[in-house]
Image: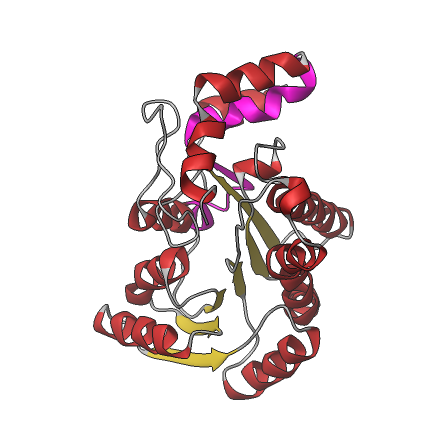
Amino acid sequence: IFLIIENAFCLFSLRKKYFAGEIVLITGSANGIGRQVALKLAPLGVTLVLWDIDDEGNKETSRLAQQNGANRVFVYHCDCTRREEVYEQADKVRKEVGDVTILINNAGTLIGKKFCDLTDEEFEKTFRINFFSQVWTCKAFLPAMVACNRGHLVSTASGGGLLGLYRQSDYGASKAAIISMMEAINSELYHGGKRGIKTTIICPYFISTRLSKGFKTARPCLFPVYDPEYAASRIVDAIKKEKFYLIMPPAVYLLGLKIFLPRKAALFLESYVKFPESMDEAFGQK
């Protein structure tokens, strides 16, 4: 009860992480949130390791990060959906840079089709990009963190992982899998005495990146679409404060109440915020 009250009212200020000297690897760093997180971390004394399949975009992120004060930036081409490639590039990073101490899994995709319209290949693709890529990266870098009982795993999930939403059967399932996996890893670390390794799970609503494809919210006061730069600042702050969950905006907490509410209440909330109409407008013609 005390821990719940402490968390709800922030009775004590959270200890803040110092980033100087950390080796931070970001997947999906060529644009969007990944790029903005890199730019926010650049002046804080970290070594940045940027992974993406978009080589030109990744080079631009590197250039901007160096302009923002980053001293050491390493750029790698890596398709995180390919397990062998992840392990190969991870070995390169260990040899050329060192052991990663903060892993930010950011790469993701959203197709936005209804369940029966999704091909088997598209469903598998969503899971490879959104979920299995995080499995492989955690497998690659977590053992070194465990060995020294120090590190931080940051996973971008989604509010869609808290409640299955319209046109998100594949996306929501992949994000729910991320949340469950990271909670399980955190449990294993805690009970294994490896409490120096922190975990942060990011659960946002829509953010105005290429992933959202022009999604427009009908209730911006309740469910705003955040700018990538603002979202990145919240993510870096959550890492700094070593928060376990970052849920934004606050209304996304409502999605977690689904087990206490009748199913029709969740469907009514979707209707009230006109989520199906927004999804149809953004993804229905593509």
Q: Nearer the viewer, residue 92 or 30?
A: 30
Q: Is residue 240 left or right of residue 101?
A: left
Quadrant for residue 86, please give it. Answer: bottom right
In the rendered view, does 10 fall on the left or right side of 1?
Answer: left
Q: Determine whether 24 is above or below 158 in the image.
A: below
Rendered location of residue 190, percent (x, y): 72, 47
Q: Which residue: 61% across, 30% down?
A: 163
Q: Residue at x 54, y 14 (%)?
A: 268
Which coloring applies here? Answer: secondary structure
Instruction: State whether residue 220 is above or below residue 228.
Output: above
Whether residue 165 appears in magenta in the rendering, the answer is no
- Residue 51: x %, y % from top left: 48, 72
Query: Is residue 256 among the parts visible in the rendering?
Result: yes
Q: At x 41% / y 79%, what residue is drawn?
A: 55
Looking at the image, residue 157 lies above or below residue 64: above
Of residue 55 and residue 51, the one placed in the foreground of this image is: 55
Residue lying furthest front: 285
- Would residue 159 appear left or right of 238 to someone viewing this image? right
Left or right, 43 with respect to 215, comes to left
Q: Nearer the viewer, residue 241 or 52?
A: 52
Q: Which residues are magenta?
A: 238-261
Query: How many callouts does the rendering have?
Result: 0
Q: Position of residue 57 (x, y in %)?
A: 35, 72
Whether residue 156 is situated above or below residue 11 in the rendered picture? below
Instruction: Name the quarter where the N terminus is drawn.
Output: top right
Residue plotted at (46% across, 44% down): 283
